[in-house]
Image (spheres, rainbow, N blue to C red):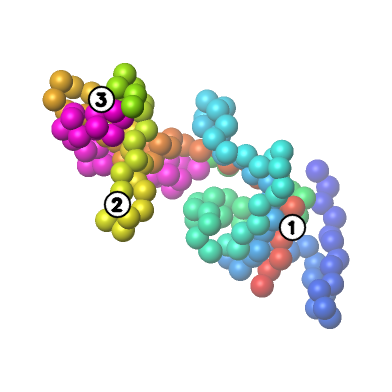
Amino acid sequence: MIISLIRRTKGDLSMTAASVNERSRVVLHFSLKLESGAVVDSNFDASPAEFVVGDGNMFEAFEQSMFGLKAGEKKRSVIPAESAFGLPNPENIHRFRRHEIESMVADQPDSLTPGLMVTFADAGNGELAGVVDRVEDEAVYVNFNHPLAGHNIVFDVHVIEVENQ
């Protein structure tokens, strides 16, 4: 792919093809996939996303994988699990009395099986989602790890626009 220098004027400031760095505003299309090829998220068929590097909207490893890219460039990176959604933490699997969880799904009694998503209120009255990990006679174990914890993520990006501040 041939990339030509793009000359742009913003006010009376003239810039040449900016590359993504720690002070960039970036407009992009992206996809997140598992190594199996399963798509987790993508905006390639939608409007591009916009973010500012370091604003907290994207994990640092994803941002850093784009450093040096210019508008029009594409890249595929594999982000290791520990730098993406983290590694599973066994301490994030909690035991509940079965009757406590059964009361939460009373309208669907047969649904209490591994894989069921359940929502709890956290200390700040926010929602905390967990996934039923296993069901025993007297107990239900709920996994509060991020569903993508432990997975390497394939990050495809097409940079549409870069503006350095």
Between the C-alphas of marks 2 and 3, the distance is 22 Å
Q: Which mark is residue 97?
A: none
Q: Which residue is mark 1?
A: 161
Front residue of 21 and 46: 46
Q: Earlier in the sequence, mark 2 or mark 3?
A: 2
Residue drawn where x is 74% and y is 57% of the image: 161
Which residue range is magenta in the image? 79-106
> Which quadrant is the C terminus positioned in?
bottom right
Q: Where does residue 141 sit, x and y in percent of width and height?
A: 23, 31
Residue drawn where x is 45% and y is 41% of the image: 80
Instruction: Give yes or no for contact between labels 2 and 3 (Cβ–Cβ under 8 Å).
Output: no
Q: Closer to the observer: label 2 or label 3?
A: 2
Front residue of 131 and 98: 98
Q: Where does residue 158 sit, x and y in percent of width and height?
A: 70, 46
**142 sits to left or right of 27:** left
> Which quadrant is the N terminus positioned in?
top right
Instruction: Give the residue type at disc 1.
Output: Glu
Q: Which mark is residue 134?
A: 3
Crowd band around label 1 with a 10 angstrom C-alpha radius: few (<14), some (14–19), many (20+): many
Instruction: Give the residue type at disc 3.
Output: Arg
